[in-house]
Image (cartoon, rainbow, N blue to C red):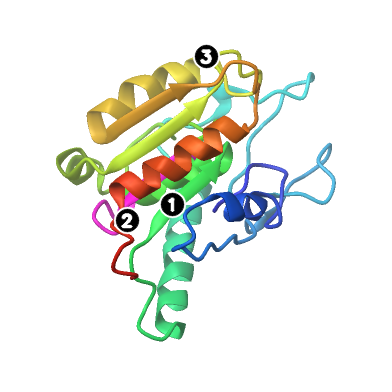
Amino acid sequence: MMHGYGSFEGDLIELAERLPEAFVCASPRAPLTAPPPVVNGFAWFPIPFDSNGLPVPQALPTDFEGTDPHAAALAMLQWLDELDARVDGGLGTQVLMGFSQGGAMVTSLLRLEPERFACGVNCSGFVIPGAFSGDAHLAEVRPPLFWGRDAADPIISAERVAFTSEWLPAHTELDARLYPGIAHGISREEVADISNFITRHVDISGGR
């Protein structure tokens, strides 16, 4: 469970009790301290903001290879590898979930290791532009991906949404849903849909 820009590890974990009981949820803290105006928040990679405090989409580079977003995804895979080695019997089936920038991390991890994860959940997030090493293979594997958002989301730009709307169906088995009125957030209805989505795509009857 990967939190959004400016948040922290205690955020999404509060949703764990409303997800399938068979899963153990982990919520890591992003590696970077988000700069002002954010207070006591963290980020997976830097995002420039304009004078109104909104993200500047055109400032994001078109190729993230070797830059912070790509490095953050690699670091997250390393963290999962280390966790897998420490857990008796390994982690078992893995599902990704993220909000906003954490949602971008979900798709980035799938792009690096398309067959590692049973499915992904992207809440009010987006896809990072540019090429990742596993993009072509991801389009072949097409793992299930849930993308929930509000069409009137005031944070994610129209350009970023348009790119994501085109990219996701070409690379994943997409379950896209709109939740009017949630703005840049997650509703109880969405969490219920996420729980059902995970249950559909992961066989939890056998435990691991």
Closer mark to the observer between disc 2 and disc 3: 2
Disc 1 to disc 3: CB gap under 8 Å? no
Label 3: how many residues lie within 10 Å, few (<14), some (14-19) or many (20+)?
A: some
Instruction: Please determine whether, in this image, residue 22 is positioned above or below residue 108.
Output: below
Q: Is residue 107 left or right of residue 159?
A: left
Please give the residue where the numbered disc 3 appears in the rendered image. Answer: 158
Q: Is residue 27 left or right of residue 53?
A: left
Q: Nearer the viewer, residue 50 or 19?
A: 19
Tell which circle, 2 or 3, labels the residue nearer the N-terminal end. 2
Give the labeled residue for mark 2. 117
Q: Which residue is mark 1?
A: 96
Q: Is residue 188 above or below residue 40?
A: above
The x, y position of residue 137, in whole percent, is 18, 45
Percent coordinates x, y for residue 203 in the rendering? 28, 57
Mark 2 neighbour class, 10 Å CA radius: few under 14, some 14 to 19, many 20 or more:
some
Residue 154 in view: yes
Magenta span contains residue 120:
yes
Alpha-carbon distance for marks 2 and 1? 7 Å
Q: Of circles 1 and 3, which is in front?
A: 1
CB atoms at circles 2 and 1 under 8 Å apart? yes
Give the residue at x 67% y 57%: 9
Disc 2 residue type (three-letter):
Phe
Residue type, mark 3 in image: Ala
Residue name at image x 33 percent, y 64 percent: 93
The quarter of the picture where residue 59 lies is: top right
N-term mark: 2 or 1: 1
Query: In terms of secondary structure, where does tag 3 sit?
Result: helix
